[in-house]
Image: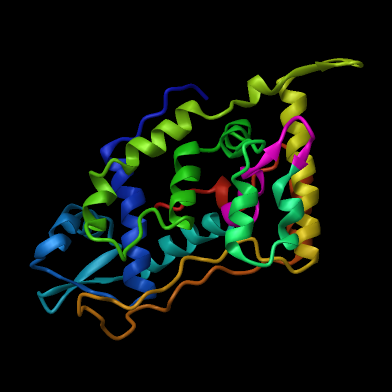
Amino acid sequence: MGRPYTVSEDKKKQYAGIYVLEYMINNSVAFPLLLSGPNADLESILEWHLIKGYVDIRDKEKYVPTEKGHEVLTKFLARYSEYLNVFDIYCAVDLEAGEFAFASYFDYENASAWRAFINDERWEDLRIAVAEFKKLGPVEIVFMNFIAEKRFGRDSTGWQFDLLLGTVWDEILEICNTSIRWQDLGYEDEEGEVSGEQAIKDIITQGAELIVNLHKKEARLALPIEHEDSKDGNRIEEVVEHVVIKEHPVDYYYDYYDPYYVSPPFRSGWMS
């Protein structure tokens, strides 16, 4: 998978669209047909939703999500769950010591102490390397990370603009294009040369073991997208059932011991 990565306007609409769709479905929000203020920046996204059949127009006055939109969000959140519970484990790896920051996850009782620990310079972010090795889309992986970190936070003014036109997309591409590649992970030790492929396979297998151990302790590595109260007065009765991230039993993660394994949510697309 070559670099540099780019993201087309249509792809931006897909990613921005799923973000808006989650907001509409899980917060029972309907946007008026005549958008005003900051919401006017959502017009092209909502029109794209309408064409795809993810939303419909009710009473000639507002956009509401459809069952098809519910199905698409369900597929995406299955992938998002996989990101939170699997890929995030590779966000901080000490390559020299062969250690994962998440091995110490339960040693920290509050979020600020954990953030200070995980921001230490010795940790390398290998999420893109793992995604590239598994032939997955790094742009989507970073987009999911930005959601988890609330970089598209709906509490901030102008979030609607940022979804398509903000510099956040430049940041996403910069991360994708400058991150460590698995081909560069090769090294030489007293036993001889270790290729980048051998190194990333070992890292993925070690990460899988850690994932299983954390889940055995009933760890929750991250929370699903939080639901918010609408601040624009557009709450409606629930049109379709809310979509939540489902928990998996520990044995679900055993397949990840195979470094080439790609789970069903990532093998199938979420767009329809």
Residue 190 seen in the current view = yes
Magenta span includes 102: no
Q: Which residue lies at the image location 23% right of the left edge and 74% below the top edge?
A: 30
Using the image, determine if residue 120 lies above or below residue 34. Answer: above
* Image-quadrant location for residue 90: top right
Horizontal and vertical percent for residue 197?
Answer: 72, 24
Which residue occupies the foreground of this view, 1 or 148? 148
When the figure is inspected, residue 37 is found, relative to residue 232, above or below; the finding is: above
Q: Can see residue 194? A: no
Q: Left or right: 97 with respect to 157?
A: right
Residue 63 image offset from top left, x and y in percent:
20, 70
Q: Is residue 122 above or below residue 149?
A: above
Residue 212 relative to residue 58: left or right: right
Q: Residue at x 48, y 57 (%)?
A: 148
**Residue 177: percent from the left, percent from the top?**
46, 27
| Magenta stretch holds residue 95 | yes
Where residue 54 appears, as percent x and y from the top left, is 30, 63
The colour style of the image is rainbow
**Residue at the spot x=79%, y=36% of the render?**
98
> Which residue is located at x 58 percent, y 28 percent?
180
> Magenta segment, which residues?
82-99
Q: Toward the viewer: 64 or 84?
A: 84
Total numbered labels placed on residues in the image: 0
Q: Which residue extends farthest bottom?
A: 237
The answer to whether residue 134 is above or below residue 159 is above
